[in-house]
Image (cartoon, grey):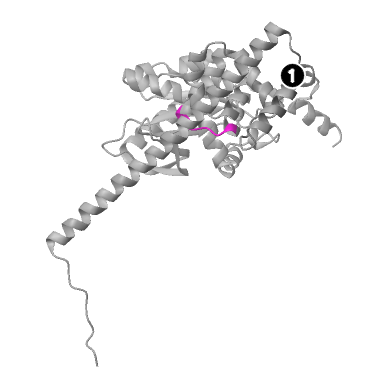
C-alpha cells in the first residue's frame, strides 16, 4: 500500500515569491484594464470627431451648393455600399451629424468634453437640452458621474442644472470653506419624487416607506456618493430613544447624512429636533475619521424667510429643501390650472357623505 504524500509546506522564500507574484499579477491586470479602457475611449472620441467632420462637410455643401435633403439619402446609400461593415451611416444618422455640426461650430469644443461621451449621449443633449451652456454642463456631469444615456435623459428632463445646489442651508457658518462649498453642491431644491406616482403621501411614515420601496430611484435623485445605511435608525439619548427617518453616508463628504421627512409645511421646530439628532449621530455613530454629520430636512412646502430665520444660529450643518412628486410639472400650464386640488376633491367627496 502506497503511503499518502502530503504537500510539502512552503518555506518563507516561497511564500514571499507567491506574494510578490500576486502583487505583480494584480499590477499587470490593472494595466491591461486601463489600456483597454483607454482604447475604448480613444475609439469613441475618434468616432465622434469623424461624425462632426462628416456633419460639417454636409452642412457646408448644402449651404454653398444649395443641396436638398435628398442628397443625404443618396450619400447614405453610397457610403453604406462602400463601407458595408461600418454602422452609423444611415440617412437618419447623417442628419444627426449635420445637426451636431450646426450646434457646435468649433471643433475644439467637440474635442473636449463632447468627444469623451458616446454618440447617443450627444444626441440626447441635442434633443433635450436647450442651450450650448446647458449641454456642456450635462456633458461634464455625464463624464464625472458615469451616467448612461437613459439616466442622462432623465436628469435633463428633471432640469437638474436648475435644482443642484439650490437647497437653503447654513453650511458657510458650520463647515470649513472647502467642505461648505462641496456640501452646497451635493444638495438640491426641489427633490423630484415622480417615481412615487400621483398618490400624495399624507404621513411621514408613508412617504418614508415609499422612498425605501424605490430606493434605487431615490438614490439616483439624491445624487452620486450617497450610500444607504438604514431606516428608523435608533439614537439613545439619556433615557430616551429617538429614531432617524433615513440615514445615509456620503462617500465624498465622508460624513453621515441624516434625512428627516415631513409630509407638510416647514415649521421652525423641525430644525431644533434635527440639530439634536446631528449632535447624537456625531457622538454615537461617527468614527474619528468621519467629518461632522449633515442634516437634510425635506418638506412639502416652505417659506424661504422662515427657513432663513430658523437656520440662523444653528450650530450643526443643515440643509432644507422641498420635495415634489414631479408629475404636474410635465403638464401644460392650462391643464395644470384646470386640475382640482386635493382639498377640492376632499370637499366634493364630503358632500356625498
**Whole-percent x and y of residue 103?**
61, 14
Q: Nearer the viewer, residue 65 or 258?
A: 65
**Whole-percent x and y of residue 352?**
87, 35
Residue 199 is drawn in which quadrant?
Answer: top right
Task: Determine if the magenta segment contains residue 145.
Answer: yes
Which quadrant holds the N terminus? bottom left
Q: Which residues are magenta?
A: 144-149
Residue 106 in view, yes or no: yes
In this view, 22 is above or below 317: below
Task: Determine if the magenta segment contains residue 262.
Answer: no
Q: Which residue is at 72% across, 29% downward?
A: 77
Residue that extends furthest to the right in the rendered view of this protein: 352
Q: Residue tagged by mark 1? A: 71
Q: Nearer the viewer, residue 235 or 250?
A: 250
In this picture, residue 144 sits left or right of residue 333: left
Q: Nearer the viewer, residue 315 or 40?
A: 40
In this picture, residue 19 sits left or right of residue 106: left
Residue 268 in view, yes or no: no
- Number of marks drawn: 1
Q: Which residue is at 69% across, 21% downward?
A: 95
Q: Which residue is at 77% across, 19% downward?
A: 70
Is label 1 in a helix, a strand or a loop? helix
In this picture, residue 2 sits left or right of residue 225: left
**Whole-percent x and y of residue 106?**
53, 11
Residue that extends furthest to the top in the rendered view of this protein: 64
**Whole-percent x and y of residue 126?**
63, 20
Badge 1: residue crowd in 10 Å (few <14, some 14–19, many ≥20): few
Q: Which residue is at 68% across, 6% downward?
A: 64
Residue that extends furthest to the left in the rendered view of this protein: 12
Amino acid at each position: 500500500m502506497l503511503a499518502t504524500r502530503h504537500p510539502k509546506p512552503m518555506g518563507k522564500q516561497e511564500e514571499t515569491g507567491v506574494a510578490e507574484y500576486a502583487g505583480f499579477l494584480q499590477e499587470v491586470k490593472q494595466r491591461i484594464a486601463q489600456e483597454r479602457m483607454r482604447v475604448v475611449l480613444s475609439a469613441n472620441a475618434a468616432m465622434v470627431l469623424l461624425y462632426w467632420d462628416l456633419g460639417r462637410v454636409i452642412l457646408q455643401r448644402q449651404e454653398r451648393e444649395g443641396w436638398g435633403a435628398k442628397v443625404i439619402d443618396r450619400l447614405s446609400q453610397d457610403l453604406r455600399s462602400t463601407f458595408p461593415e461600418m454602422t452609423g451611416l444611415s440617412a437618419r444618422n447623417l442628419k444627426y451629424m449635420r445637426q451636431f455640426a450646426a450646434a457646435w461650430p468649433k471643433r475644439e469644443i467637440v474635442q473636449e468634453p463632447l468627444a469623451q461621451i458616446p454618440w447617443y449621449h450627444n444626441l440626447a443633449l441635442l434633443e433635450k437640452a436647450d442651450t450650448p451652456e446647458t449641454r456642456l454642463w450635462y456633458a461634464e456631469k455625464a463624464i464625472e458621474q458615469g451616467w448612461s444615456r437613459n439616466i442622462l435623459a432623465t436628469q435633463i428632463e428633471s432640469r437638474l442644472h436648475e435644482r443642484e445646489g439650490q437647497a437653503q442651508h447654513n453650511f458657510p457658518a458650520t463647515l470649513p470653506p472647502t467642505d461648505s462649498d462641496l456640501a452646497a453642491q451635493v444638495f438640491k431644491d426641489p427633490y423630484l419624487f415622480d417615481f412615487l406616482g400621483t398618490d400624495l403621501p399624507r404621513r411621514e411614515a408613508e412617504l418614508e416607506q415609499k422612498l425605501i420601496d424605490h430606493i434605487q430611484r431615490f438614490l439616483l435623485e439624491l445624487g452620486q456618493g450617497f450610500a444607504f445605511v438604514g431606516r428608523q435608525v435608533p439614537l439613545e439619548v439619556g433615557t430616551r430613544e429617538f429614531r432617524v427617518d433615513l440615514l445615509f453616508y456620503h462617500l465624498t463628504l465622508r460624513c453621515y447624512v441624516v434625512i428627516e421627512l415631513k409630509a407638510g409645511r416647514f415649521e421652525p421646530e423641525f430644525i431644533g429636533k434635527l440639530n439634536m439628532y446631528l449632535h447624537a449621530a456625531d457622538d454615537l455613530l461617527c468614527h474619528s475619521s468621519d467629518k461632522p454629520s449633515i442634516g437634510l430636512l425635506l418638506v412639502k412646502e416652505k417659506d424661504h424667510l422662515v427657513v432663513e430665520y430658523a437656520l440662523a444660529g444653528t450650530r450643526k450643518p443643515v440643509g432644507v429643501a422641498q420635495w415634489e412628486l414631479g408629475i404636474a410639472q410635465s403638464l401644460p400650464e392650462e391643464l395644470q390650472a384646470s386640475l382640482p386640488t386635493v382639498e377640492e376633491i376632499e370637499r366634493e367627496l364630503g358632500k356625498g357623505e
